[in-house]
Structure formats: structure tokens, C-alpha cells
Image (cartoon, coloured by chain):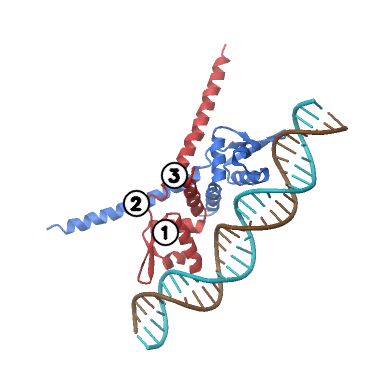
Chain colours: A blue, B red, C cyan, D brown
DNA sequence: TGAATAGTTAGCGACATGGCTAAGCATGAC
DNA sequence: GTCATGCTTAGCCATGTCGCTAACTATTCA
């Protein structure tokens, strides 16, 4: 657990804010300019910019400036590390529960006459 | 997006810390006392207690005190909401990419002689 | 009873986060 | 050129987070 770990922290932290999650959902429909993203939130532009910076540093979006308009787009696959971690945990947790089940079964068999 | 949303934020925030993730991984092996969890981290007990409180408030673990020992255990299924959200996003993102694909195909067909 | 063990509570300090305003570029329209 | 538009930068404030120490409570062991 090294850089991998820091990346995961950054990723989960970026997802831990409703405003940022809403922005991602909006961007799922397609690329959008900064102002378009700001609109629905009711937040001021500088605040929105910070959220976008967090998303970009976490690798969740990419942005590019064309003229005076910055367009933001989702980065497909950026969620994968989070998904993978969750899957691994679920596997570990289930493995333990399965072992518990097996143990209970064994004990029950031993108690048979 | 209502209470559901706050829960998700709490969940992702709880996961956004390497120490807390390590604790969860440790707990996947089986229940453990507070001191057992503190050991590997090198952190002081009060600090560990705060992390445990965050995990418990997020619904990721349950704790119970027996005598002077508090035992912590994983709460199976607590990760599901996070997983579900990630799956939904992936579906949305892919749906858009599919539509893009379809559009490109259409354009290419039109350009045929 | 007295001492070691396991948590707990209270409170401090450094730093991060999330919001804002005000002012400063660029770029595109006229 | 001039001006509106769209973003950017700088900086302020309140609050939250993460670490710590010190002092306290409650069990258990001898």
C-alpha cells in the first residue's frame, strides 16, 4: 500500500461531497462548461472552480480551455479503483462469513448423536 | 437526493482515510479490540477512538463493550450503498459512450458512397 | 486492597475544506 | 477600440479534521 493508497484516498474524498457527485452525474450526460456546471448548484464561480480542481486532481474529470470557455468532461474508468477496492473488501468480508458458516456446520455435526 | 445523499457523503468520507481503510481490512479477518486495532497504526488511543467513531457513525462497524474491553466488528452490507452509486454512475457513463458510438456509426454510414 | 490494564473525556494546535467577495485577465461581439 | 462574457486569482472567514497530551473511569488480577 503506497501511492495506490493515496490515490484511493483522493478518489474517495472527491466523492464524499454531494455537490461534486452532482457535477459528475451532470457530466455523465456529456461535457459542459464551468458556468453550466455552476448554474444548478447555486454556488459562486470560484467555489465551483475549487470543486472542479478537486475532481480533476482525483482524475475523475479532464478539462480543456477553448477560447474563453473551459469544457469539462468525465474521465471514463476513473471510478474503477474505488470499485475494485469495494469488491476486494466484499470478498474478504464474505470469505470470513463463509468460514463462520462452515464452522457452525461442523459444530452442529459433532453434536449429532 | 435527500438523506440518502448525506449517508453517501458520510460513507465515502469514512473510506477516504488510509488508516480507517486499514482498520476495515483488519476487521475483515474477524472482530478485534480497540487496542488490537491501535497497535499496527502506531497512533495513540484517543486518535484511534475517533477513527472508530467515524466508522461507526457511517454504519461500517458495530462496537460492543464487554467488561473493560470494547470489541469492534464489521457491519456486512454497509458498503453496498457506495457500490450501488458507483455502479449507477458507470451505467450512466457507459450509456453516454454507447450513444456516442452509435452516432459515429451513423455518420460513417452516411458518408458511404 | 492496591496496582496494572483498557477505554474514555477534555481540550489544544496545525492544517484542510468549503463558502464568500473583490479585482484581474483574456476572448469574442459590436 | 470598447465592452460584455467567462473564467481566474488572491485573500478572508467559519468550520471540520487529525494528531497529540493529560487526566479520569472502570475492570481485572495479585
Q: Residue at x 35, y 71 (%)?
A: B67
* Residue with the mark numbered 3: B83
**Which residue is most to the top?**
B113
Q: CA distance from mark 1 to mark 3?
A: 20 Å
Check contact, mark 2 vs mark 3: CB within 8 A. no
* Residue with the mark numbered 1: B26
Residue A62 located left or right of residue C3: right
The location of residue B52, given as percent across then percent down, is 46, 61
Total numbered badges shown on the rendered structure = 3
Name the image quarter holding the C terminus of chain B.
top right
Label 3 resides on the chain identified as: B
Q: CA distance from mark 2 to mark 3?
A: 18 Å
The location of residue B25, given as percent across then percent down, is 43, 56
SS assignment at label 2: helix
Residue B17 located left or right of residue A36: left
* Residue with the mark numbered 2: A95
Q: Please tell me how crowded label 1 is: few (under 14), some (14-19), or many (20+) other residues with Cα within 10 Å.
A: some
Amino acid at each position: 500500500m503506497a501511492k495506490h493508497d493515496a490515490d484511493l484516498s483522493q478518489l474517495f474524498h472527491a466523492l464524499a461531497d454531494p455537490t461534486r457527485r452532482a457535477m459528475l452525474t451532470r457530466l455523465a450526460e456529456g461535457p459542459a462548461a464551468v458556468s453550466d456546471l455552476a448554474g444548478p448548484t447555486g454556488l459562486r464561480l470560484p467555489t465551483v472552480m475549487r470543486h472542479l480542481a478537486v475532481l480533476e486532481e482525483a482524475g475523475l474529470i479532464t478539462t480543456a480551455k477553448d477560447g474563453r470557455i473551459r469544457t469539462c468532461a468525465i474521465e471514463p474508468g476513473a471510478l474503477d479503483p474505488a470499485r475494485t477496492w469495494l469488491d476486494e473488501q466484499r470478498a474478504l468480508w464474505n470469505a470470513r462469513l463463509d468460514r463462520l458458516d462452515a464452522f457452525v456446520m461442523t459444530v452442529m455435526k459433532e453434536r449429532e448423536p
